[in-house]
Image: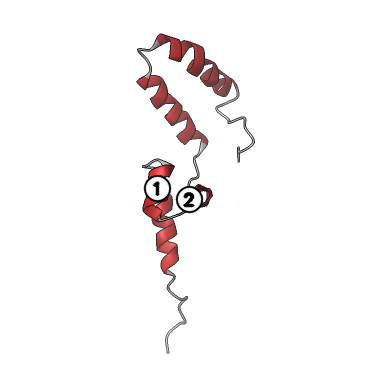
Amino acid sequence: MGPRRAPFVLYTFRHTSITRWAKHMDPFTLHVLAGHTDMKTMKRYVHPSDTDILDAMGRVRAAFRDTASMTNRTMLPIARTMDAHSGRRHCSTAR
């Protein structure tokens, strides 16, 4: 008789898939595709890193580059605050 193997758990594949999808789609779409009824459940799958957040801010800056009032009054002060603190988030959800 060979070595005993751990039981196959289908949920592990589901969790891994949803976690990986979270990097590529918004949480609202992911929530629907996963079949969840409560958005709070998405907290198990969405784990943005500091780099993910800074990249998202960069995409917003690029999208509004031509809109001087948005870039100058809103995004740049936020980016300067984050850059001044080594790119770390400063909110209660920081890990």
Name the residue carrying label 1. Answer: 30
Q: Position of residue 59 (x, y in %)?
A: 39, 26
Quarter of the picture holding the N terminus: bottom left
Residue at the image position 48 percent from the left and 46 percent from the top: 46
Label 1 crowd (10 A; few <14 / some 14-19 / many >=20): many
**Amino acid on which disc 2 is placed:** Tyr
Residue at the image position 40 percent from the left and 56 percent from the top: 35
Name the residue carrying label 2. Answer: 45
Q: Position of residue 77 (x, y in %)?
A: 54, 16
Residue at the image position 36 percent from the left and 21 percent from the top: 63
Q: Nearer the viewer, residue 53 or 39?
A: 39
Q: Position of residue 85 (x, y in %)?
A: 60, 24
Residue at the image position 41 percent from the left and 9 percent from the top: 68
| Residue 66 figure quarter | top left
Residue at the extreme right: 92
- Position of 57 relative to 19 (above/below): above
- Position of 84 relative to 14 (above/below): above
Q: Is residue 31 left or right of residue 79?
A: left
**Amino acid on which disc 1 is placed:** Leu
What label sits on residue 20 in the rendered view?
A: none
User: Sequence order check: which comes first, mark 1 or mark 2?
Assistant: 1
Between tags 1 and 2, which lies in front? Answer: 1
Q: Secondary structure at mark 2?
A: loop
Q: Secondary structure at mark 1?
A: helix
Q: How is the image coloured?
A: secondary structure
- Position of 6 relative to 27 (above/below): below
Q: Is residue 94 left or right of residue 64?
A: right
Label 2 crowd (10 A; few <14 / some 14-19 / many >=20): some
Q: Position of residue 13 (x, y in %)?
A: 40, 62
How far apart are labels 1 and 2 at the CA level?
9 Å
Quarter of the picture holding the C terminus: top right
Q: Are marks 1 and 2 in contact (CB under 8 Å)?
A: yes
